[in-house]
Amino acid sequence: MLRIEQLSFSYGAIRTLREVDMVMQPGEVTCVVGRNGVGKTTLLKNIMGLLKPNGGSITVDDRVVTSMTAYKRARIGLGLVPQGRQIFPRMTVEENLFVGLEASPVPTRKIPEFVYDLFPVLKEMKGRMGGDLSGGQQQQLAIARTLVGSPKVMLLDEPTEGIQPNIIQYIGQVLRQLAREQNMTIILVEQYLDFVHEFGDRFYLMNRGKSVASGTTDELTAELTKKYLSV
Ligand SMILES: Nc1ncnc2c1ncn2[C@@H]1O[C@H](COP(=O)(O)OP(=O)(O)OP(=O)(O)O)[C@@H](O)[C@H]1O
Ligand SMILES: [Mg+2]
């Protein structure tokens, strides 16, 4: 379980997260929604340890990780699939996956087979350069690269951005399956609301650095959407 309490963060003088409280449970896909620039990516980077908060705490299964390095957080089971995928274009698919293995709790040089079972296209394309893959294939690679590190908590930053609909559906099913079958805690930052309703269990709605509403995804009503999400 991931617990965030009173989390605050500023870029210089600009307060970007303001006393955020959230709880994410294993076995569930929890979605963080909100307009552009409300602080969603900043939140994930603070959880992952890529940014250091000014106040508040982050706890994973009763272990306070607030001042742990990103590397150590990866080792204890946090994994981030970054916005824009950030795969290595001049490395092969397999080499990209080897990078993800660095986060494994036990040292290994073997790509776990379940990752290729989940994303068979990556097995076919093992020897191809990351940069030669389509957007959807790159997104699958980005998710797989995080999964090879055996995360207990997986953070995904807008995985549907710029991806064709059939791959979006497939990714949604995979995330649900990982939550249900591996009891993973999944935190999904997403602006595509149909995806949130179809594959998410719970949501937190952010506005200007604060969490302003939460509940089951059924409770993400048209009224809330109109007030905080429409442009
Ligand atoms: N490195 C930075 N330095 C200063 N300000 C930043 C930096 N990165 C982001 N910001 C600002 O912080 C605010 C929150 O940015 P963040 O990237 O967390 O938003 P977001 O909700 O992820 O947006 P999007 O939906 O567009 O990805 C924005 O106003 C943004 O301009
Ligand atoms: Mg973002």
Image (cartoon, rainbow, N blue to C red):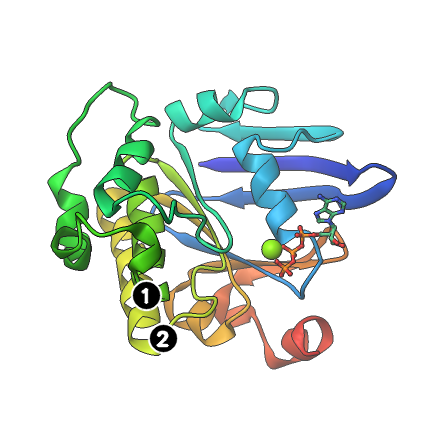
Q: How crowded is mark 1: few (under 14 residues within 10 Å), some or many (20 or more)?
A: few
Of 57 and 122, the residue lying toward us: 122
Q: Is mark 1 on a helix, strand or loop?
A: loop
Q: Where is residue 181? Give x, y as percent.
A: 22, 48
- Residue appearing at x 35%, y 77% in the figure: 165
Q: In this view, does 42 lie above or below 36?
A: above
Residue 108 is left or right of residue 63, and the answer is left
Give the quadrant of residue 9: top right
Q: Is residue 167 above or below residue 119?
A: below
Q: Which of 80 and 229 is in front in this view?
A: 80
Ligand 1 within 8 A of label 2's CB? no
Residue for badge 2: 164
Q: Nearer the viewer, residue 120 or 93?
A: 93
Count of numbered circles in the view:
2
Residue sitting at x 43%, y 66%: 160
Is residue 118 shown left or right of residue 101? left
- Amino acid carrying label 2: it is Gln
Task: State left or right for residue 45 relative to residue 120.
Answer: right
User: x and y percent of residue 120 in the render?
Assistant: 14, 57
Residue drawn at the location 45% of the way across and 70% of the way down:
162
Q: Mark 1 points at which residue?
A: 134
Please name the residue shown 33% across and 26% down the image. 102
Looking at the image, residue 95 sits to the left or right of residue 34; the answer is: left
| Mark-to-mark CA distance, 2 and 1 | 10 Å
- Residue 188 vs 217, above or below: the answer is above
Q: Which residue occupies the foreground of this view, 122 or 204?
A: 122
Where is residue 80 drawn, in percent x and y? 45, 42
Label 2 element class: loop
